[in-house]
Image (cartoon, rainbow, N blue to C red):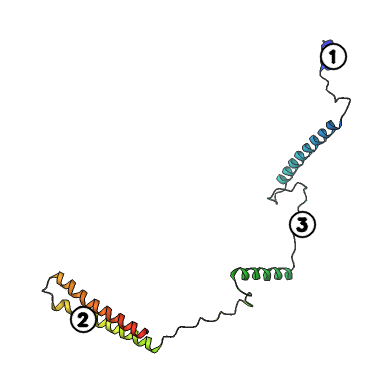
Amino acid sequence: MVSTQKRIRAYCPTHMPQKLTAEIIHAAIEGFESQKRRIDLQIGELRQLLSTDTTEAAPASGVPAPKRKISAAGRRRMAAAQQARWAKARGEAEPASSPATPKPAKQKRKLSAAGKKAISEATKRRWALKRAEAQKPQATAGKKAATKKTAAKKPQRKAQKAVQAAVTSVAQ
């Protein structure tokens, strides 16, 4: 049995070869560095499980970056710059000096006296036609429905033409 163990060791050496080349050394370094990275990640995950106050994953270095502190003056400058950017995006020349200043009221349109008169006359004509049409069906209730429709259409067309003529004469 002793003789078989000696033979196995002769064919399968368990130690590193005697001559180390540069390629073998570089490969060994890369292998150990990858193992180190894997172990560092596992350590970081375990540390994260221990710390209950942080919910984010711990960085690989293990040291969180310090929080940036901004002064009140710096915040005011940043707010003014952001307002200027929004004003530029909206197409304004400058941002409003204060949000309390109201915008100037839009100028109201004014109707001329001739325009008012034309509208009034047209409205009076329309109401007169409507009243006349309302009285006609009562007086001619005995006639057929077909004659009512054609009789009602003719005065309407004449009235519409008269209104249009009045409006165009006033507009000129």
Question: How far apart are the two marked residues, 1 and 3, measured between alpha carbons?
Answer: 62 Å
Question: How far apart are the two marked residues, 1 and 2, measured between alpha carbons?
Answer: 132 Å
Residue on which disc 3 sits:
66
Q: Earlier in the sequence, mark 1 or mark 2?
A: 1
The single residue placed furthest to the bottom in the displayed view is 113
Q: Which mark is residue 80?
A: none
Q: Quadrant of the N terminus?
A: top right
Q: Nearer the viewer, mark 3 or mark 2?
A: 2
> Residue 158, image x and y in percent?
24, 79
Question: How far apart are the two marked residues, 3 and 2, measured between alpha carbons?
Answer: 88 Å
Mark 3 is on which residue type? Pro
Q: Which mark is residue 132?
A: 2
> For numbered disc 1, what is the local secondary structure?
helix
Q: Quadrant of the C terminus?
A: bottom left
Residue shown at 71% from the left, 70% from the top? 77
Q: Nearer the viewer, residue 38 or 34?
A: 34
Mark 2 is on which residue type? Ala
> For numbered disc 3, what is the local secondary structure?
loop
Q: Nearer the viewer, residue 90 or 164?
A: 164
Is 84 placed left or right of 157 in the picture? right
Q: Earlier in the sequence, mark 3 or mark 2?
A: 3
Q: Is residue 110 above or below residue 150?
A: below
Circle 1 crowding by C-alpha within 10 Å: few under 14, some 14–19, many from 20: few
Is 160 placed left or right of 8 in the picture? left
Q: Tell me whether circle 3 and circle 2 mark residues in contact (CB < 8 Å).
A: no
> Residue 50, image x and y in percent?
72, 45
Residue shown at 15% from the left, 77% from the top? 138
The single residue placed furthest to the right in the displayed view is 18
Q: Which mark is residue 6?
A: 1
Mark 1 is on which residue type? Lys
Is 91 placed left or right of 131 in the picture? right
